[in-house]
Image: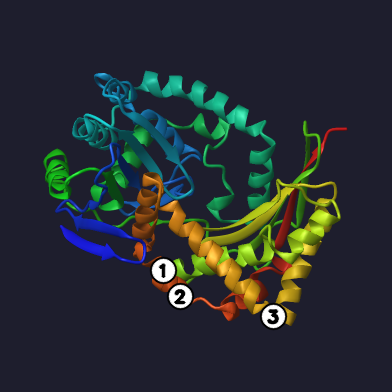
Amino acid sequence: MNKTNYDRIGESVYETTLPNGLKLYVVPKEHHAKSYAFFATRYGGMDLRFLRDGQWLDTPAGIAHYLEHKMFDTKEGNALQELAKNGAEPNAFTSNAITAYYFDSTEHFEENLKILLSFVTVPYFTKASVAKEQGIIGQEIRMIEDNPEWQVYTRMMQCLYEKSTARVSVAGTVESISHITAETLYDCHKAFYTPSNMVLCVVGNVDPQRIMDLVYQELPGRGAAAPIERDYGGQEPDAVSQKETEMRMEVSMPMFLSGYRCTPPGKGEELRESIVGEIACDVLLGDSSPLYARLYDKGLINGTFGGAFEMLPGVAYLYAGGDSRDPRAVAESITEEAGRLVREGIDETYFQQIRKSTFGSMIRSLNSFENIAMLLSEGYFKGYDACRFPEVFDTVDREDIIRFLRENIVESRRALSMILPKD
């Protein structure tokens, strides 16, 4: 295994690519009782159409999430129960771009790791179990569709994008999952749950060489498959799909998200642009920003207000929102403040304050084993060394932030999603 010391973040990372194509990271944490394993595939809610054996396959919305649910089934029973018996705390999630299975434990870690590697790589579905799961997941979908926070976000994405599969709910719909069969699940597992499309991160009081030997013994001989060609929906038109949407639900106060469709970074620029976008978000919307102070003083926002910058396959977007008695006024103010910063510039003292605060938050996030594993995994899937973020951070200046605001936070790129009280 190769060892890299990252002095700026105080971490040492062992990494290797196994003969079967699996990327393995091990981050030793001596003097910690807990160890953590994170096994992820680059397959998520956006991966609805892909090329396999020379043919394009279209799959139902929600299938990656459905597959995540079914992966815990084994011939012997249920992997969740087996891990829990060994004192582990297991779980899983499906996002737009990845599906991950993970656990932490203070004892029987290697035995638990074997269970994790086994059930994730060896699928077991029956027609009866797949049909039964439709009712369970259908109920879950109905519950999230009754959630105002889910509705305001999903409707914002549908306004921002016309073609991208980022506009499709990760869970799918009750109708879409009705088309999922055991055969379809096996096809998707075969396509995406191959070692060369996956990454395993282990963080804790472990021996890197021992972990590598264990993984090699459990997953031997499977050669690296060809990269999967994916279709995320094609080129978007210049304008957002819809400028505004509103829906009435049982909320006491209007809820909103104002989204801005940003230019996706070029290849090799993903890490830098993610840092630029995060700093820009803090400069524009943070709780120490001039905009936040003005809106708060006017009673237009409260403590629920906040924003974020996100990058998904082929798309990037910044959004801000919360509760407000006048969402349109807040959305207009965000766009106007971005224009002011572009015209007048960003105060150097304020910029350095935000820059240090953003950097400090990124460093503090590494106190979490889960965040370390996520950082390494996302970086690997996107093609960069995520632990080098301090060096990239050093290259970002005020002009980068102004350029980001000038190009992206403008009226033509904005869409407003609102959830209004029923009365």
Front residue of 120 and 308: 308
Give the mark nearest the N terminus, 2 or 3.
3
How dense is the environment of label 3, judged by Cα within 10 Å: few (below 14), some, or many (20 and up)? some
Residue farthest to the front, as pictured: 31
Position of 145 relative to 234 (above/below): above
Label at residue 345 = 3
Report helix, strand or loop for mark 1.
helix
Q: Which residue is mark 1?
A: 390
Q: Mark 1 to mark 3: distance in Å?
A: 25 Å
Q: Is residue 380 visible?
A: yes
CA gap, disc 1 and disc 2: 6 Å
Q: In the image, residue 337 lies at what x, y percent?
A: 76, 69
Q: Amino acid at mark 3?
A: Gly
| The disc label shown at residue 23, or none | none
Residue shown at 48% from the left, 32% from the top: 179
Circle 3: element type: loop
Measured as percent of width and height from the top left, residue 68 is found at: 40, 35
Residue sitting at 24 percent across and 19 percent down? 76
Residue under pointer 2: 394
Residue 330 position by quadrant: bottom right
Q: Residues within 10 Å of mark 1 (few under 14, many from 20)?
A: some
Q: Amino acid at mark 2?
A: Asp
Which of 34 and 38 lies nearest the eye of the viewer? 34
Residue 194, horizontal then vertical, whole percent:
26, 46
Q: Is residue 378 left or right of residue 352?
A: left
Left or right: 68 in relation to 335: left
Could you tell me which residue is drawn at 33 percent across and 35 percent down?
A: 103
Q: Residue at x 74, y 74 (%)?
A: 339
The answer to whether any part of residue 404 appears in the image is no
Using the image, determine if residue 42 lies above or below residue 80: below
- Image coordinates for residue 225, horizontal then vertical, percent: 23, 53
